Image (spheres, helix red, strand yellow):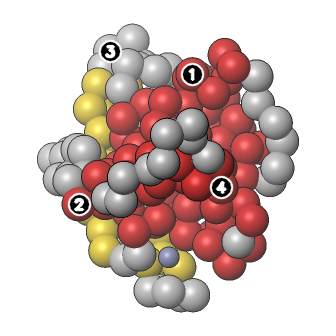
Amino acid sequence: MAIQPPGGTAGGINDLYQDILVEHYKRPRHHQLLPDPELKSEGFNPFCGDRVVFTARLDGAGRISGVGFTGQGCAISQASASMMTDVLQGLTLDEVRGVVGRFRAMMQGKVLSEQEKEALKDLVVLEGVKQFPVRIKCALLAWSALQDALAEYSKSRNKLETST
Ligand code: ZN
């Protein structure tokens, strides 16, 4: 990347964010699907052809014990999925819903507290995307898949409970 002039500018910060995004895009974390996942879903964004398949496994205590995804598409969609898998590990499903809510709020323009930002880790670099409404869909693709997977999972759980 280009060397920034001393003193720093807003452009410098954006470059740093850009680097983190590209790094996730080039070397996505948890980039494989898990066998026998409790949570599984697929998202597709026809706007730029982004696709994400998301899987997660739960341990006996109902916490996320493993996550994985595959997909292809633009850098924002794939980096967002990679960053998302980084924050989900070890969370309960209620905590996962909290993270989804915070991320969506950030993309809708809500200013998050420092604490909320910390919980989102690298995902805060996607905040700048909110200026580009078309790209918000890309950033949210993996999250929509995650929410579908959560909904599907609670539905199947309810079915199990009512049938016994
Ligand atoms: Zn996209």
Give the Cα separation between the discs numbered 3 and 1: 27 Å
Q: In the rendered image, which residue does mark 3 sit on? A: 60
Say what amino acid the circle numbered 1 marks: Glu
Please identify the quarter of the rendering in which residue 114 is found: top right
**Residues at circles 3 and 1 in contact by the CB criterion of under 8 Å:** no
Q: Earlier in the sequence, mark 2 or mark 4?
A: 2
Q: Is residue 95 above or below residue 46?
A: above
Please identify the quarter of the rendering in which residue 25 is found: bottom left
Say what amino acid the circle numbered 3 marks: Gly
Q: In the rendered image, which residue does mark 2 sit on? A: 26
Label 2 secondary element = helix
**Foreground label between 3 and 2:** 2
Q: Earlier in the sequence, mark 3 or mark 1?
A: 3
Q: Earlier in the sequence, mark 4 or mark 1?
A: 1
* Residue 147 placement (x, y as % from top left): 58, 50
* Residue 14 placement (x, y as % from top left): 55, 52
Q: Which mark is residue 105?
A: none
Q: Earlier in the sequence, mark 3 or mark 4?
A: 3
Label 4 CB-ligand 1 distance < 8 A = no
Q: Residue at x 20, y 53 (%)?
A: 27
Q: In the rendered image, which residue does mark 1 sit on? A: 118
Label 3 secondary element = loop
Give the Cα separation between the discs numbered 2 and 1: 23 Å
**Foreground label between 3 and 4:** 4
Q: Is residue 29 left or right of residue 18?
A: left
**Residues at circles 3 and 2 in contact by the CB criterion of under 8 Å:** no
Answer few, some or many: residues within 10 Å of disc 1's Cα (few below 14, many 20 plus, some between 14 and 19): few
Say what amino acid the circle numbered 4 marks: Gly
Q: In the rendered image, which residue does mark 4 sit on? A: 128
Answer few, some or many: residues within 10 Å of disc 4's Cα (few below 14, many 20 plus, some between 14 and 19): some
Give the Cα separation between the discs numbered 4 and 1: 16 Å
